Image (cartoon, rainbow, N blue to C red):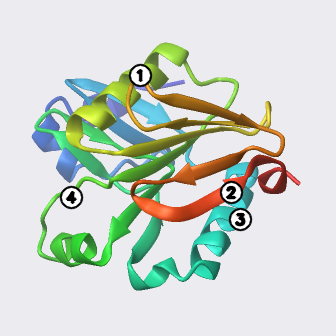
Amino acid sequence: MVTENQIQNYPSTFAEFLLWEPEDGYKYEWNDGELICFTGMNKKKVYIYDYINRSFIAKQYLELGSLVSEYDVQLSGIQMRRPDIAYLTKEQITETKKGVDVIPEFVIEILSETDNINRVEEKVTEYFKAGVKVIWHIFPELKMIYVYTSRRDVKICIENDICSASPVLTDFETVVSELFA
């Protein structure tokens, strides 16, 4: 139950949101005046993140950048999203050290049965509008991955299909059945 005191502590502007440190244990996104609450990575998501991260390291992509979990991505002056996993190049990481907001070219969202499809599709639109080039939507319960290279170009991967992060990471790919093994 949310108390009156907790409501008063919620940010009411984007500037307040950027400075806000929630004390309730939840994580938040900001979308044009709307505060969106989520719980962050659960055990299943951590396993998927670990698998993808180990694959990333095995392909020696650490020379080019890093996979960052739950990175704050300021998509516009009114939107702060937090994808489950974002790929940042070494150059982008250097820019973040200077306080610059950078847009990852590759993001991964690990979806659950409680995610609202309309919200998910809104984020796809927002990500591409901001400059993201590849989005993976991973559905652990269904053992499938949607690979978006634009809002119109979506590949649905199941079983032994190969999902690619091309053109961002040309030979970074995973076999669906191996991810969910």
Mark positioned earlier in the residue sequence (2 or 3): 3
Distance CA(mark 1)–CA(mark 4):
24 Å
In percent of the image, x 54 and y 83: which residue is there?
60
- Circle 3/circle 1 CB separation < 8 Å: no
The residue beneath circle 1 is 152
Is disc 1 in contact with disc 4, using a CB cutoff of under 8 Å?
no
Mark 2 vs mark 3: in front: 2
Could you classify mark 1 by the number of other residues whose Cα lies within 10 Å: few (under 14), some (14-19), or many (20 or more)?
few
Q: Nearer the viewer, mark 4 or mark 2?
A: 2
- Is 148 drawn above or below residue 167 in the view shown? above
Residue, disc 2:
174
Which amino acid type is shown beneath numbered disc 3?
Tyr
The reply to whether the C-beta atoms of the residues labelled 2 and 3 are less than 8 Å apart is yes
Q: Is residue 72 visible?
A: yes
Please, is residue 122 above or below residue 88 in the view?
A: above
Specify the label residue 102 is tagged with. Answer: 4
Query: As shown in the figure, which amino acid type bears the numbered disc 1?
Result: Arg
Compared across the picture, whether 101 is left or right of 142 comes to: left
Q: Secondary structure at mark 3?
A: helix
Mark 1 or mark 4, which is nearer to you?
1
| Quadrant in the picture for the C terminus | bottom right
The answer to which of 8 and 32 lies nearer the viewer is 32
Quadrant where the N terminus is found in the figure: top right
Check the image and name the residue furthest to the right. 181
The mark that comes first in sequence, 2 or 1, is: 1
User: What percent of the width, then of the height, locates residue 62?
Assistant: 47, 82
- Mark 4 or mark 2: whose residue is earlier in sequence: 4
Q: Position of residue 11 (x, y in %)?
A: 22, 35
- In the image, taking residue 36 as reference, residue 77 lies left or right, namely left
Closer to the chain start, of discs 4 and 3, is: 3
Residue 41 visible in this rendered orientation of the protein: no
Q: Is residue 175 left or right of residue 65?
A: right
